[in-house]
């Protein structure tokens, strides 16, 4: 999986880049090598809210794009929350695909006439 990290109003340091790669490593094992993960780190000052550090991730798979968004007072925590949200979506997507494949295989097996002996 290819990971692209960009920053908006935040410099993307090597430390942040390594944290993103380490956090999304588990997801990378579950998806195709052709998948692309785009992570955008930003700082959005809001009045009356401490959640200024924002992480947004878009995982582009074959035929579907999964997105996650998280905000917290610390960038590391935002990255972790975003990774958790995306991991749940990837698991749900994989389960759906497996279920569809099993259903199609069962239907194909049932529709084929059995050979007489």
Image (cartoon, rainbow, N blue to C red):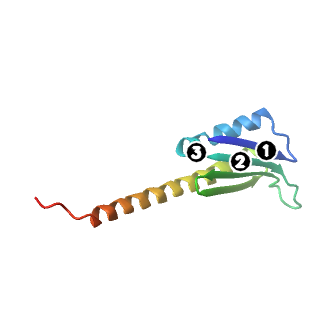
* Numbered label attached to residue 6: 1
Q: Residue at x 67, y 56 (%)?
A: 67
Q: Which residue is mark 2?
A: 38
* Image height of 11 relative to 93, above or below: above
Q: Is residue 3 left or right of residue 96?
A: right
Q: Residue at x 88, y 47 (%)?
A: 9
Please identify the quarter of the rendering in which residue 15 is found: top right
In percent of width and height, residue 98 lies at 44, 56
Question: Is residue 35 found left or right of 15 in the rendered image?
Answer: left
**Residue shown at 41%/58% (left/top)?**
101
Q: Quadrant of the N terminus?
A: top right
Between 80 and 34, the residue placed more toward the observer is 34
Label 1, secondary structure: give it: strand
Residue 114: quarter of image:
bottom left
Q: Position of residue 35 (x, y in %)?
A: 61, 46
Q: For the residues labelled 2 and 1, say whether their Cβ atoms are less than 8 Å apart.
A: yes
Of callouts 3 and 2, the N-terminal one: 3
- Which is more N-terminal, label 3 or label 1? 1
- Rendering coords of residue 5 (x, y %): 75, 42
Q: CA distance from mark 3 to mark 2?
A: 13 Å
Badge 1: residue crowd in 10 Å (few <14, some 14–19, many ≥20): some
Residue to which mark 3 is pinned: 27
Q: Quadrant of the C terminus?
A: bottom left
SS label for mark 2: strand
Pointer 2: residues within 10 angstroms few (<14), some, or many (20+)? some
> Closer to us: mark 3 or mark 2?
2
């Amino acid at each position: 999986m290819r990971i692209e990290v960009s920053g908006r109003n935040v410099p993307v340091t090597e430390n942040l880049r390594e944290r993103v790669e380490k956090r999304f490593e588990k997801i990378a094992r579950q998806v195709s090598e052709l998948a692309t993960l785009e992570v955008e780190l930003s700082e959005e000052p809001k009045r009356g809210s401490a959640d200024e550090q924002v992480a947004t991730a878009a995982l582009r798979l074959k035929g579907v794009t999964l997105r996650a968004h998280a905000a917290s007072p610390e960038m590391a925590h935002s990255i972790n929350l975003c990774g958790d949200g995306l991991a749940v979506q990837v698991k749900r997507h994989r389960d759906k695909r497996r279920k569809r494949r099993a259903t199609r295989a069962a239907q194909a097996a049932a529709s084929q006439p059995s050979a007489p002996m």
